[in-house]
Amino acid sequence: MKNIIFKELKELTRDGRFKIATGILLILLFVAAITGINQYQKNNQQYIESVDKERTIWETQDEKNPHSAAHYGTYAFKPLFALSLFDYGVTKYTGNSIFLEAHNRNEASFSEASDQTSLARFGTLSINFVLIYLFPLIIILIGYNSYTKEFEHQTFKLLKSQGVHPVKLALGKWLATFIPVFILTVVIFLATGLVLSSLDGLAFFSWTSLLVLFVSYSFYYLIITTVTVLISMWSKSSGMSLVSSLGVWIIFSFITPKIATNFANTSYPYPSKSEFSSRISEDKKNGLDGHNPWNEAAKKLEEETLKKYGVDSLSQLPFNYAGYRMQKGEEHEAKIYEKHYNILNEIAVNQNNTYKSLSFISPFIPVRFLSMDITHTSDNLHWKFTKAAEKYRIEKQKFLNYDIKDNAKKGESGYKMSSEKFKKLPKFNFIPPKLPQVLKENMQNLLFLALWFALPFAGLIITSKKI
Amino acid sequence: MFTNNLLYEIKLLIRSNWLAVLLISIGLLFTFATFNGTKNITKRLNDISTVQEELYKKDSSMLAALTKIENGEKTDIPYWQQPTEPMTIGYRHPRLTIMHPETLSFISTGQSDMYTHFKSPTVYGNNFALDYSEMVNPIQLLFGNFDLSFVIIYILPLLVIAFTFNILSKEKELGTLRLLGAQPISIIRWLLQKMMIRYIVFTVITLVTLLITISVFSIGAFTDTANLAGLLLIVSGYILFWFIVACIVNIRVNNSAKNALTLIGVWLLIVMVLPATINQIGNSLYPTPSRLKMINEIRLIKKENEEKQNKIMDEYLRNHPELAQGNNEQKFGFWHNYFASEKVMEEKTKPLVAEYDLQLKKQQGLISMFKYVSPAILMQQSLNNIAGTSEKHYNDYKKQVFEFSGEWRNYLVPMLFKEQKFSTKNYHELPKFIYKNRIENEVLLNLLAIVAISLLIFFVLIGKNLKDKSAQTISI
């Protein structure tokens, strides 16, 4: 087997096509890394500055009515994670800031993609772009004729007559196809890790995550290698083998994900923004409005509160009722938002499951999802961020409303909170999920990858014995 | 000789499975893509009609209330929501600014999955910084749609490659090239004729299938003959480009496996690598300023305004006009202050917004310069232009909405200052928004560019072989 591997590798090193292809890919990776680092540093700097500035704006407010401050609002900014430099994921499409104000749950607005030209839809040259789309092509380039060339040069019979065990031959060729790509991958991940760890101000960089990412990609390459060698075994000519392997690559990386988009869209359509907001305002209409003391829910709350404290009128309450009502209204509205956003989240999860269920046609899909999750650039992470921001918004409202409740005198309309107190509002801090949790959430993807490896590999061993 | 070649080629094509494979694959791909495209349009139209219905309902009840008030009857509407107040109309009853799909929108999703197609600009609020994004799962934006534009840009070239990669090399590998060399025609001419015949067959099949699928799914497209003709022409041009590349590779490389590899390499370069690299470089050279920065600056301007005017409660009152005291004088004061500070705000943020426009224009400029490097970019731009879904269309739509919001405000604000009441008569005079596709359709220019690029590489790379009439320039 060792001989087979060495022979194949020697042939490969003599092959000009392989050298050219690898050279081009390395240049692309270099461009991707340089521009990626440049962009990351710029964006991260802006993120840090924005967080600081926004906080200063909040803390240096003049004394004002807390509810006025609640309407004035603040922003929650999504941190830029170190590995996003490796895989941009959906960050370009999600927006990275959420306006947190009274009564309204806002969405992250201003996605980068909407500030760019439509060229962005071709994809962006990132390290992950090269690794996930182009590296499989190197494998195909190396492996498409691993068997067919033996058939075409009629050396296969010669090999057999020498008593080479068919499984050993298959494994030899399989390893010989995989090893060059594996070495390249090791070098690239190592370089990425070294570059990342030497950069300043990177948020949440971890070698373990990078290692898991490396294992996932290597596993994907193993799958592509197995499929390529298997196709070569089945093909009659190198040309056919090449065309079939490329066909498979196109189905894996382009056709299946796009078909999945249409399936997901049909089965679980998203509401339009206006539809979504009109559903929310419909629900809000019937509920408690913190501003309106005359609606039914407000009257009910009034009765309940009086009963709870055993008093006859609001003036006898030990706190400012207006602030209390405002907070109750806020809590009620938050629940409405939670309900509708949960519905939306469910649609998103169902849509993503549509993609994931098509993983049986394409191992590209589980790797793509896994990669985004590990690098914290997935929509899953974005949901977590929006939920954290909403939680913070509710806490912030409570902080402000309770200030009215506890400090404003009854009937005082011009109550103002001292400017010092604004500083006491805790800061928003978002921490992404840890790797074990990410992996736990990706069990299905891992399972699909394992299956994608096991089945073609079994096919490879069985076919090798038959030819 | 040409007739012989033609007859032989047609016989060959009919006998081999190629024609069947081509017909089936193009048929299936086009059907699925057109079906998806029309479905997306239907969803867009449904969304639009839902909001239109809502507006109609709201308008009807508003008109009913107006008539009641005009007839001196009482309504149970609180005073701050009375439709006789111009500001109530301006804020609570905005008009819809709808961007209807173009006749051929189904051919390319373009940017249409990212942006909304209707907006309701109100008389106040930061209309210049409205968010136009639509609710969509970002994963969908990442992977993209299976539409005609995807099939044409990505898959058609692959079919051309599969159809042509071994035309010459096969003859060499089968040993029949020597036989051909003995014929009274140069091998180059023989190959060119063969390519031309295949090009015609391929293009005819593609265009006819395209027309059939369009007539099945979107018969209305035939009313827009100019754009439909543009589509057919640009697709023919794109196919021509790939045939010429295949022809060059056949002559230059002339080994089936190597031909296929080279052609796939070219495909990768043209369709994937170059656009992605240009995009990345464009973003690095002309990054649109961070929106985070803009948020900060707008907030700072707001803060400055607040401090200057010492009217902290303004913001509060703006959101809760019901809490402002009821007399007209005070309301007038509130709105007067508001519009004054809004004006200051708009003036101050103008340079910020302009900076975004400028960077985006620079990015677009970079693309228009580099689009000639890759016919795939030219195709994407052309198809989006025909479909009316390019970023230029959406930016222009934003501009039109902004212009309309000015019109809306200019109609209502003077009424406020003149203390005029809004009436049913005014309702019929309200400004209406009609979206106009003002983007120049550069399809013919792009077509010219594709043909010019094709001819240029053709003559530069195999011009020498063409001059030499003998077969010697190709290694037999």
Image (spheres, coloured by chain):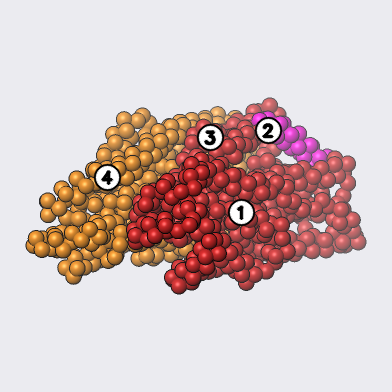
Chain colours: A orange, B red
- Where residue A249 appears, as percent x and y from the top left, is 37, 57
The answer to whether residue B343 is magenta is yes
- Where residue A322 appears, as percent x and y from the top left, is 61, 48
Query: Residue B287 got which mark?
Result: 3
At x 37%, y 49%, the residue is: B475
Residue at the far right: name it.
B71
Circle count = 4
**Camera-side mark, 2 or 3:** 3
**Real-space Cα separation, disc 2 to disc 3, in angstroms:** 19 Å
* Kind of residue at badge 4: Asp
Q: Which residues are magenta?
A: B329-351
**Camera-side mark, 1 or 4:** 4
Taking depth in this image into account, of A244 and B304 the one nearest to the observer is A244
- Where residue B175 appears, as percent x and y from the top left, is 34, 60
Q: Is residue A365 left or right of residue A171?
A: right
Taking depth in this image into account, of B262 and A450 the one nearest to the observer is B262
Q: Which residue is mark 1?
A: B234
At x 43%, y 70%, the residue is: B16
Q: Which residue is mark 2?
A: B350
Q: Is residue A93 left or right of residue B211?
A: left
Taking depth in this image into account, of A84 and A365 the one nearest to the observer is A365
Taking depth in this image into account, of B473 and B274 the one nearest to the observer is B473
Instruction: Assign a secondary structure to mark 2.
Output: helix
